[in-house]
Image (cartoon, rainbow, N blue to C red):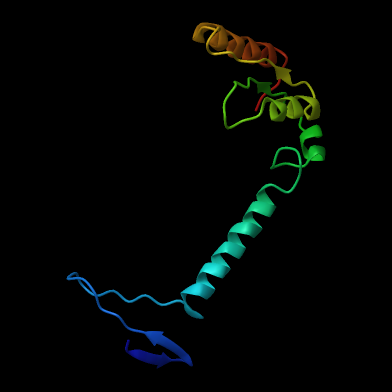
Amino acid sequence: MPTVEIDGMTTHDEISGSGPPILMMALGGFDSAVDRYLAVVAMSCQSLFDRDTISGAEPEELMALKLPPLILPGPTDFHATSCARYLEECIPGADYGDVHLESQPPDHIRDRILDFLATHASAGVHA
């Protein structure tokens, strides 16, 4: 396999296939690039999921919120209801209601949202 040295790095040149040639380079070689990529992914994961509760705002930031939220979690494979309960506990004035799509018609959920908005609009709470 032909090699070329560029800036102290040895590169390998291989041509295969019938399409136009492309140039691929990775400082330190592709093994090094993969190792760096995996390190970045691991670090990102640690930053995104840095606690046993939900990621994002710190509990103190949630407790300082002035606007009450309407929390309507539904059962999914991607979101734990416990996260919604955590938000309810942390945010003052949170209005929590489980959503069971299989037993609640969409009109019921819409009415719940409209009631929440009407209650807080009449109380002078604005976003």
Depicted 62 relative to depicted 13: above or below: above
* Along the viewing direction, whichever of 31 and 70 lies nearer the viewer: 31
Q: Measured from the top left, where is residue 63 in percent x and y?
A: 81, 33
Residue appearing at x 69%, y 26% in the figure = 84
Residue 29 appears at what percent x and percent y? 48, 79
- Name the spot of residue 103 as percent of width and height, x first: 55, 7
* Position of 78 relative to 99 (above/below): below
Horizontal side of residue 79 vs 26, given as left or right: right
**In screen coordinates, is 60 left or right of 100?**
right
How far across and how far down the image is residue 109, in percent?
56, 11
The residue most toward the front is: 1
Query: Along the line of sight, which residue is nearer the eye, 82 or 70?
Result: 82
Q: In the displayed image of the protein, which residue is found farthest to the left? A: 18
Residue 67 found in image quarter = top right
In this rendering, the answer to whether 101 lies above or below 43 is above
Q: Is residue 79 above or below residue 120?
A: below
Q: Residue at x 69, y 47 (%)?
A: 49
Q: Residue at x 47, y 74 (%)?
A: 30
**Number of numbered discs on residues:** 0
Relative depth, front residue between 22 and 112: 22
**Which quadrant of the view contains residue 44?**
bottom right
Quadrant where the image shows the C terminus: top right
Please identify the quadrant where the N terminus is shown: bottom left
